[in-house]
Image: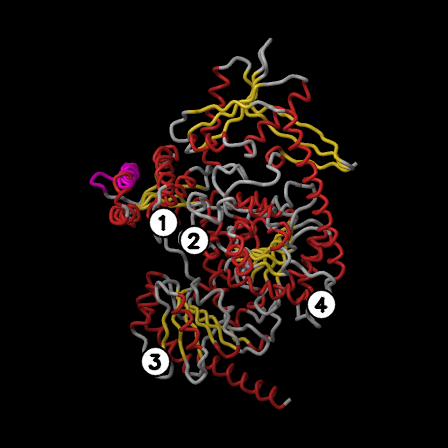
Amino acid sequence: MQTISLGVREFALPTPRVGSIDSQSGYGALPQSGQDVHNAFLNKRKRQIPGYEIEVKLSRRFSYGDYEIKVAGRVDGLVKVDAEKPVIEEIKTDLDIHRLANLLRSGKSHPYILQLLSYGYFYQEEHGQECDLRMILVSMKDASSTTINLKLDKAEYESWLDRRLKELVEEYETVQIRRERRRNLAGELKFPYQSMRPGQDELGKAVSSALDTGRSCLIQAPTGLGKTAGVLYPALKASLAEGDQVVYVTAKNSQHEAVVEATRLLNGCGVSRPLKTLVLTAKSKVCLKDEVYCNSDYCEFARDYYEKVDTGKLQDKASGADVMDAEHFVALGKKHRVCPFELSLDCVSRADIVVGDYNYVFSPRNVMGRFLPGPFKEKGHQPILLVDEAHNLPDRAKGYYGGEISEERLLDIKARIAKKLPNYSIEGQALVEEVLKIMRGFANSGGRYSVRQIRVSAGLFEPVRNKIGEYVQNYLRSSMLLLERDPVLELNNLVSDFVDALDYDGEEFVVLAKPEGGGTLKVVCLDAAQRLTETYKKARSIIAFSATLKPFEYFANVLGFDAAKLDLHEFDSPFPADNRKLLIVPQISTKYADRPKNYGKISEVIKRVTRMKEGNYLVLFPSFAFLEEVLRITRLDHAAILVQERVTPRDKVRETLEKLKDSEKSHVLFAVQGGIFAEGIDYPGDMLIGAIVVGPGLPKFDLETELLQSYFDKKYSEGYKYTFVYPAMAKVTQSAGRVIRSEKDRGLILLLGRRFLTPPFMEAMPGYWLAPGQEKLVSQAILADVDKFWRASSVMVESAGKK
């Protein structure tokens, strides 16, 4: 007899499903925002009621066919008094307990009701004694409460129980069939290309070795090695062989198509049943409403969502496609009047590979729980996690756990409420003023903000946050149509996100007051490694790869890996070394104090080098301010200058790229390291023949970086390197990587600045950069060295043409 184990929350669901996407639906994880109120209320009950027990374990085993189903959970409160019925209490917190109470009283199909009835049934079956059941709803606004008394109708409950057990067994068997299909598919998968690129076979073997031994992997491999296919293929073979999934996350949505194309190629290699690929797309991009707000009072696609999905068998329909992407889910959403985003999440467990942005896995609101099939958290069945462009993850993860609020933003929201929402103006403006009043308590006398570290408790903002939540609920229940960039929703999101950030504990979190934005309070996460480590526990193995992951020790630490369970691999460029000329120019200094004396030298290098061979060049600066100073004195008669703007709209990016495709003209693009033109964009063929990197772009020194340096000094005794050197060199390596993207590309890379020759900067360089020897990297005669390279390249091209 097989055993199926699950928790009460997963077990106590209506059959068939009913309900809407709503904070009061009872589906999904409980919100953390009400946990303090919940705990305080429980502790108060324990103090006031003799014999009151909290977090009492209750479980029950059921037999159904060839299965034993074990359900376990913890009752919030249990009171056992002699000669009286035991009382079981479930505590639920909410901003609007009266609305929730009406919802719960309207029927017995709500998950909260079924949870409490299940506890009552478990207790009665185990002890042979009926008990009173109380659902106590506690307000997050003022801790007031209301009680709903329930009575267990045993016959009615067992009728539901029989349906639910049947449903669980069917779902479990479907999961096993899906796993068996994956195991068969693993044996059929073939590498999608006739031959492997140099180094690609070794890359695949490195991934396979780590997965076979249950280890994780950090891989530095340059562009052109074929990382996507080289990593994805062995990961799929290993995960599918166990009946499990692969989760592939990227820093940019533009990288998703390469993964989808790889799965299409794999499907074209003779598999009997194709891989199922699901692409998670941002909610804002697939939302069918003008404003993204998941509330059934406002959104008809959220209303009765669970019933529509269940009766329409929409998960089956959606997962019939080989590629489930935004277009696919939007079409289904429109046809069946359901939320496309939520439907995509509901289909995650049905895919063999799930592709998405980092935030779906690493943010506080991650959806990792969806990757485990339904309620069956079986031991040993976890997805393999692939992290592309992993050098981006530390900063992205820190951003997920930070937050800020500014007077400028609040005053803008206040003005828009006053102008556009007269019926909600008085209350809305008063709430903004209440937030501002709290903020101004951290300003200096005279209302000015200075840069300093402060201590702020989330509890200070909690009362006004709850008031804003109630204000939003009233607003949504009105007949008002939501506005584009709705100020009420913006106020709610701004304050809620900031208070959530204040809730995080640990020495890696600091709060700053800053003068920017008319006065800003900012929660800074100095190091997200611990949070990343917790996420990794939900995966079988993690393969993190990029062209920029050195020094390995630094990235292993800031990415939260356990060094004892981590393999490290560095791969050289697969392209001939003669195709690339990399030179360091130490005659120039880019230190802040030396910059004014070097603007002219830098401009002269740009003029002379870009004149030597027609084509497009990318000049990358540490900052816009530095760029603008050099641009001001640079005049070119042989090429058109293009400039990255401080705020670059997408259409401007496209326009710039189109100009670079014009082979009749030469262009020199002035841009910043780490920006849109320095990372994440390919320049195929002759679209780019050279990159001039103007110094390592060290982060500016301010209180935030000072605190970061102090933190890393204390943790690793490497504060300067971890704060300044290694992040800067990651941008340099990415910038240089724009030039050589294929075996036919030939290009020039100049690193301007003597800092590049110092040990901490050199140890962060890819090994193949240093292979020729340091003496060959240092140019004492820049123009002669560059001319020699281009002449040799011309000879190589002519020879290749004759062959």
- The mark nearer the N terminus, 1 or 3, is 1
Which mark, residue 289? Answer: 2
**Left or right: where does residue 506 sit relative to residue 494?**
right
Where is the C terminus found, in terms of image quarters?
bottom right
User: What separation in Å lies between label 4 and label 2 (alpha carbons)?
Assistant: 40 Å
Q: Residue at x 60, y 74 (%)?
A: 575
Label 2 secondary element: loop
- The mark nearer the N terminus, 3 or 2, is 2
User: Does the stretch in magenta take in 42?
Assistant: no
Residue 423 shows in this picture: yes
User: What separation in Å lies between label 2 and label 1 (alpha carbons)?
Assistant: 9 Å
User: What separation in Å lies between label 1 and label 4 (alpha carbons)?
Assistant: 49 Å
- The mark nearer the N terminus, 2 or 1, is 2
Q: Quadrant of residue 280?
A: bottom right
Count of picture labels: 4
Which mark, residue 124? Answer: none
Residues at circles 2 and 1 in contact by the CB criterion of under 8 Å: yes
Q: Amino acid at mark 4?
A: Cys
Label 1: how many Cα within 10 Å (few below 14, some 14–19, many 20+): some
Q: Which residues are magenta?
A: 428-447
Residue 359 shows in this picture: no
Q: Amino acid at mark 3?
A: Leu
Task: Please tell me whether the stretch drawn in magenta is mainly helix, strand or loop.
Answer: helix
- The mark nearer the N terminus, 4 or 3, is 4
Task: Quickly name the residue at label 4.
Answer: 269
Query: Residue 314, how many percent across, how many down?
Result: 59, 51
Task: Quickly name the residue at label 1.
Answer: 482
- The mark nearer the N terminus, 1 or 4, is 4
